[in-house]
Image (cartoon, grey):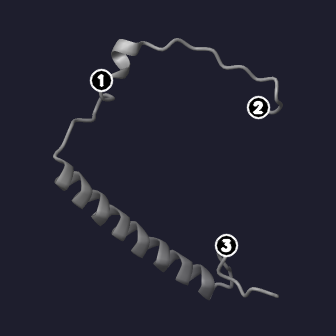
């Protein structure tokens, strides 16, 4: 969709808004933080490897090129 004249209407069920989405459950804070940290580290390694492969092929990622002053 394009344009400024777009309107989206919907109804919010405030009672249902307090419940977690289906498939999710509450977890212990420390465990969730640990899992998130591991996931971010894994994604960082994957992204770094991907950027290296692209660099070998002659591509540059955003902000990785030389800065011209």
Where residue 31 sits, quadrant-wise, is bottom left
Task: Name the residue rendered at 64%, 75% in the picture.
Answer: 61
Q: Position of residue 35 (x, y in %)?
A: 25, 58
Asked if the residues shown at circle 1 and circle 2 are in contact, with their CB atoms under 8 angstroms apart, the answer is: no
**Residue position for label 2:** 1
Question: Could you tell which of marks 1 and 2 lies nearer the N-terminus?
Answer: 2
**Residue position for label 3:** 62
Kindly state the secondary structure of the residue where label 1 is placed.
Answer: loop
10 Å crowding of disc 2: few (<14), some (14-19), many (20+): few
Please say if 68 is above or below 49. below
Kindly state the secondary structure of the residue where label 3 is placed.
Answer: loop
Q: Position of residue 11 (x, y in %)?
A: 52, 11
**Residue position for label 1:** 19
Question: Could you tell which of marks 2 and 3 lies nearer the N-terminus?
Answer: 2
Q: Is residue 2 left or right of residue 64?
A: right
Asked if the residues shown at circle 2 and circle 3 are in contact, with their CB atoms under 8 angstroms apart, the answer is: no
Distance CA(mark 1)–CA(mark 2): 31 Å
Distance CA(mark 2)–CA(mark 3): 27 Å
Kindly state the secondary structure of the residue where label 2 is placed.
Answer: loop
Between label 2 and label 3, give the one nearer the viewer: 3
Q: Position of residue 20 (x, y in %)?
A: 30, 29
Task: Name the residue rendered at 18%, 43% in the picture.
Answer: 27
Please say if 38 is above or below 4. below
Task: Name the residue rendered at 25%, 56% in the picture.
Answer: 33
Question: Could you tell which of marks 1 and 3 lies nearer the N-terminus?
Answer: 1
10 Å crowding of disc 1: few (<14), some (14-19), many (20+): few
Between label 1 and label 2, give the one nearer the viewer: 1
Q: Is residue 25 left or right of residue 50?
A: left
């Amino acid at each position: 969709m394009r344009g400024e004249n777009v309107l989206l209407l919907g109804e919010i069920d405030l009672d249902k808004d307090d419940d977690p989405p289906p498939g999710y459950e509450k977890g212990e804070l420390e465990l969730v933080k640990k899992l998130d940290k591991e996931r971010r580290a894994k994604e960082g390694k994957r992204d770094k490897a991907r950027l290296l492969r692209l660099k070998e092929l002659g591509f540059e990622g955003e902000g990785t090129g030389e800065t011209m002053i």
